[in-house]
Image (cartoon, coloured by chain):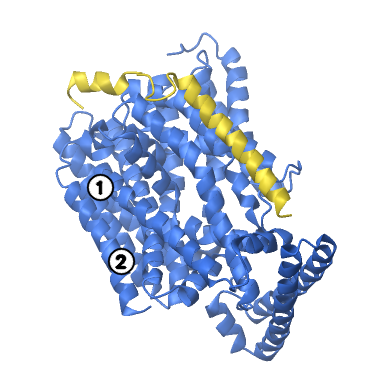
């Protein structure tokens, strides 16, 4: 990338398109994992 | 395979190769060739990350794993979303702001040349061998089940990957990954749909899930803390996080994918999408394996899924003994089918007491079937001590070939080949980048023009492609080495991750302490591998922690002799 403007764009730390902040997105991914683990646990128990 | 299957398979694969080559034909400068010009959108990068990780052997083995061992393998991926969050916070902004082409370039900016060389050399050693294995493993399975000539499969698949990866570089890899992921996903859902339609009419989806669950195949979560148990919640969440951090944060085949993102935002969104999608995706693939198990409760499966080994033992002096076991196995399967229908009927009627009793009968019969299978494996080993006694990788493909309708078989084989090609292309692309950026450009020719670097990158891609093909062709002769290749990743990933975590978080630690700590950690990991029974996932934790702690302690000794960058 030779163009400085493009390099600035690539390194610019802009906010995410949803949830307003990156911390909220990280929280969303983390709680989705917790929810999945809980659902997998219920799934394991339900068909045991 | 029927003619229609051949048309479907060749159509899909041919289209992917031509599309990738055509769309990337203008990759003339080194930035476009190695980082797709940093213009890719998050969804394309996310698909490319997933396609790189989904190798054919994963695609073939995972359902077989669920068939044999249940769904507990899903826990292996529990650390992945956590790793994606950590990398989005740390690695992505650092790599982007430093404008690096490879992850190891960062190590020189942060430490010194020797750490960069160590990181890139460990990567080239491990990934170079793994690239050969990525082509070899599916070719072996396809040759056994379909009777394809293995050398021809290896050379054809390897050459196609070399062509489009060499012509288009990262652009071609990303563009083909997009199509390959579509084929893989459509193939898996098609397999699931057909599988459900093939179950007996009186067995509903819920009935099938209950049968799988009662027979211990839906064991997705296990909270017991047991170091000797390879897949538990704890090994997945702790060991898995370290492994995924290392793989996605320091392995160039993955780093190169998100370096192609057009901004920090796009790279982060791609990693986080992978964090959201990967665990459910593995769950679905494993669930398909559990359903294949249920299917084979109502249709008697082969006693041993590898037809070549089975044919060999049958034609040997142990043939009669094997056939006797096979006869007993068929009888047990027939009896089990009757008892299973009774179990389903009691579940449907809500009769818990009867259901419990029937479950015990079925489990008892399953144990007998497993014992017979173990006896059959012993006979196979007696007949040929070098025989492959693990048939897990052949289960799903046996189901595809024998039970899927015409057309679907071609689609599924295209999906398997796509998975093989997607991983291999990313590996060749990453090996070429590391060779050119970390060795050629850094040590041999610092001031060449773009045209020269692209030319050398293409030569490096062809070199690593031929290296992978040659390794794959001779892999059969190197039995024990293949086993070593499988475990090699975990032998080096922890150490590499430790170097990177030290670089990210211990700002006062300099190059020499880190380098010495990495050497000590690598020796300790090798000791664990050679002299202990510790499961391989924990090597990542050990190697990483030793680097971080020892580097920190040594930095106190080296204090004043170097300056942190």
In front of the other: label 2 or label 1? 1
Q: Is residue B205 visible?
A: yes
Q: Is residue B251 left or right of residue B44?
A: right
Mark 2 vs mark 1, CA separation in Å: 18 Å
Label annotation for residue B319: none
Give the x, y percent position of residue B25. Answer: 16, 47
Which of the chains is blue? B
SS category of the residue bearing label 1: helix
In the figure, is residue B350 to the left or right of A18?
Answer: right
* Residue B169: quarter of image: top left
Q: Earlier in the sequence, mark 2 or mark 1?
A: 2
Seen at 49% across and 77% down, the residue is B402
Image coords of residue B546 (percent x, y): 62, 29
SS type, badge 2: helix
Q: Are marks 2 and 1 on the same chain?
A: yes
Q: In what quadrant of the picture does the C terminus of chain B appear?
A: top left
Check disc 1: other Cα within 10 Å, few if <14, some if 14-19, many if 20+: many
Q: Which residue is mark 1?
A: B172
Q: Colour of chain A?
A: yellow
Q: Residue at x 51, y 69 (%)?
A: B197
Question: Which chain letter matches label 2?
Answer: B
Q: Position of residue B479 (x, y in %)?
A: 54, 64
Chain letter of mark 1 equals B
Circle count: 2
Q: In this orientation, which residue lies closer to the viewer: B337 or B110?
A: B337
Q: Residue at x 44, y 36 (%)?
A: B273
Q: Which residue is the site of mark 2?
A: B156
User: Which residue lies at the image location 22% right of the left edge and 47% below the top edge?
Assistant: B168
């Amino acid at each position: 990338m030779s163009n400085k403007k493009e390099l600035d764009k690539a390194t610019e730390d802009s906010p995410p398109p949803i949830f307003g902040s990156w911390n909220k997105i990280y929280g969303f991914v983390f709680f989705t994992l917790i929810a999945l683990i809980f659902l997998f646990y219920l799934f394991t128990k339900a068909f045991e | 395979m029927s003619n229609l299957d051949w048309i479907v398979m060749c159509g899909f694969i041919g289209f992917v190769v031509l599309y990738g080559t055509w769309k990337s034909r203008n990759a003339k400068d080194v930035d476009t060739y190695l980082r797709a010009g940093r213009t890719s959108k998050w969804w394309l990068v996310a698909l490319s990350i997933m396609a790189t990780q989904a190798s054919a052997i994963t695609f073939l083995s995972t359902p077989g794993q669920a068939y044999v061992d249940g769904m507990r393998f899903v826990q292996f991926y529990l650390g992945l979303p956590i790793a994606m969050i950590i990398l989005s916070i740390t690695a992505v902004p650092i790599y982007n702001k430093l404008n690096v082409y490879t992850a190891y370039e960062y190590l020189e900016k942060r430490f010194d040349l020797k750490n960069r060389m160590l990181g890139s050399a460990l990567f080239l050693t491990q990934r170079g061998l793994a690239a050969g294995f990525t082509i070899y493993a599916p070719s072996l399975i396809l040759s056994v089940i379909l009777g394809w000539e293995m050398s021809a499969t290896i050379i054809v698949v390897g050459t196609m990957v070399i062509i489009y990866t060499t012509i288009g570089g990262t652009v071609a890899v990303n563009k083909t990954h997009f199509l390959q992921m579509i084929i893989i996903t459509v193939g898996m859902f098609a397999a699931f749909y057909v599988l459900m339609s093939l179950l007996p009419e009186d067995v509903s989806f819920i009935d099938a899930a209950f049968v799988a669950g009662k027979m211990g195949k839906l064991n997705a979560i296990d909270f017991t803390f047991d170091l000797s148990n390879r897949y538990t919640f704890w090994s997945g969440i702790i060991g898995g996080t370290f492994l995924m951090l290392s793989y996605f944060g320091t392995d160039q085949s993955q780093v190169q994918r998100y370096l192609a993102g057009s901004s920090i935002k796009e790279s982060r969104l791609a990693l986080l999408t992978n964090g959201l999608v990967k665990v459910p995706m593995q769950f679905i693939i494993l669930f398909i394996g559990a359903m294949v198990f249920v299917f084979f409760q109502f249709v008697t499966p082969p006693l041993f899924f590898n037809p070549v080994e089975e044919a060999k033992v049958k034609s040997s002096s142990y043939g009669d003994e094997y056939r006797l076991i096979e006869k007993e196995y068929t009888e047990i399967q027939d009896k089990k089918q009757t008892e299973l229908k009774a179990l389903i009927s009691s579940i449907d009627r809500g009769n818990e007491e009867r259901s419990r009793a029937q479950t015990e009968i079925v489990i008892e019969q399953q144990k007998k079937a497993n014992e017979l299978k173990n006896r059959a494996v012993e006979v196979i080993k007696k007949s040929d001590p070098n025989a492959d006694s693990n048939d897990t990788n052949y289960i799903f493909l046996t189901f595809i070939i024998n039970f899927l309708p015409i057309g679907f078989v071609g689609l599924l084989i295209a999906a398997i080949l796509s998975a093989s090609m997607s991983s291999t292309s990313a590996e060749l692309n990453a090996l070429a980048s590391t060779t050119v950026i970390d060795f050629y450009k850094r040590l041999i020719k610092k001031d060449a023009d773009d045209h020269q670097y692209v030319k050398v990158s293409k030569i490096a891609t062809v070199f690593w492609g031929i290296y992978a093909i040659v390794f794959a062709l001779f892999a059969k002769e190197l039995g024990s080495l293949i086993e070593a290749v499988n475990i090699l990743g975990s032998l080096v990933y922890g150490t590499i991750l430790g170097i990177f975590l030290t670089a990210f978080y211990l700002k006062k630690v300099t190059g020499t302490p880190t380098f010495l700590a990495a050497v000590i950690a690598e020796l300790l990991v090798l000791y664990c591998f050679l002299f202990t029974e510790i499961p391989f996932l924990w090597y990542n934790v050990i190697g990483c922690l030793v680097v971080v702690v020892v580097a920190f302690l040594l930095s106190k000794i080296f204090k004043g002799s170097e300056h942190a960058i």
